[in-house]
Amino acid sequence: MTFSRAAFRFFAGLLLAGLVVSARAAEFPAAFTAALKQAGIPLGNVALVVQALDAAEPVLAHNAEAAMNPASVMKLVTSFAALNQLGPGYVWTTELWADGPIADGILAGNLIIKGTGDPTLTLERLWLLQRELRAHGVRHIRGNLVLDLSHFDLPEMDPGAFDGEPLAKYNAVPGALLANFNAITLRLKPESEHVQITPDIALPGVVLDSQVRLQDTVGCGNWKDAITPSVSDGRGMALEIRGDYARGCGEQTLTLNLFDPATTFDFIFRGLWAE
């Protein structure tokens, strides 16, 4: 299957509009308005344009000049760029290199990992990668873990520049080695007098300072709004969690973008290897 720019743009136009309308349509299709009504979405909150690429005027336009949150529609832009630059058959590679001899299950040297920006290195896929490494005879590594990030030449990035929420998981910055979408999940569990907070992976060298106050309330509500995490890197890296947590919330999870991609990758890879 091949993609042409014209075909993609036409298809993207239909997706952006959210519906397909005939050239002689004078109003919204009944099925479209019925779906909006069922979803409780007023027409004033909808913006769409249906226009042929070679036409001077749109077939249908509604709130065409209104500033709207594009949400996942923006994925069309990055998807087109990926198809255009990389092609539909592109596969990311993550390479493992040993700079020392392997004997009796021991790598007497460093393990070098070279990334190319694979966005799908989840915990499960990293575990499979380590399983393949063990299948090549490596059981113990006596050297260092060396991360080769040279595939990307990235400027300094502020993860909070978008909306002032640098720890939000959707604000993870790109990285040549990006593990588990650069996300770390904290599990919050109310105990008798305090809230136990446990990360889903080991964080060696990181001091976890929980200042969360347990409240004897039944309702839970928007409990995440009452929790404030922060990361400091003074004499040592520290993760501080402040706020209030209702006992009625029970056990909950909070997924965050806590560290830069290389640090997160290091934590996850070492944690999985130690299991």
Image (cartoon, grey):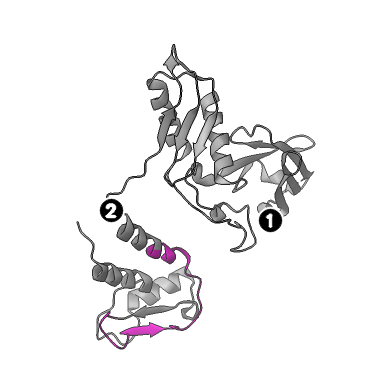
At 28% from the left edge and 84% from the top edge, which residue is drawn?
25
Residue 48 locus on image (x, y percent): 40, 78
- The answer to whether one can see residue 275 in this image is no
Q: Nearer the viewer, residue 259 or 14?
A: 259
Classify 10 Å Cα crowding around label 1: few (below 14), some (14-19), many (20 and above): few
At 68% from the left edge and 56% from the top edge, which residue is drawn?
225
- The answer to whether one can see residue 258 in this image is yes
How far apart marks 1 and 2 lie (CA) works out to: 40 Å
| 262 lies left or right of 215 | left
Q: Which residue is mark 1?
A: 225
| 189 lies left or right of 121 | right
Q: Quadrant of residue 55?
A: bottom left
Q: Nearer the viewer, residue 187 or 115?
A: 115
Q: Quadrant of residue 18?
A: bottom left
Picture quarter with the N terminus: bottom left
Label 1, secondary structure: give it: helix
The magenta-colored residue range is 52-77
Q: Which residue is mark 2?
A: 88
At 43% from the left edge and 17% from the top edge, which residue is drawn?
102
Q: Nearer the viewer, residue 251 or 122?
A: 122
Classify 10 Å Cα crowding around label 2: few (below 14), some (14-19), many (20 and above): few
Q: Pointers 1 and 2 in contact (CB under 8 A)? A: no
Residue 270 forms part of the magenta stretch: no
Residue 4 locus on image (x, y percent): 23, 66
Label 2, secondary structure: give it: loop
Dot 1 or dot 2: first in sequence order is 2
Query: Marks 1 and 2: which is nearer the front?
Result: 2
Which numbered marker is on residue 176?
A: none
Amino acid tagged 2 = Pro
Q: Nearer the viewer, residue 106 or 40?
A: 106
Residue 158 locus on image (x, y percent): 61, 58
| 23 lies left or right of 241 | left
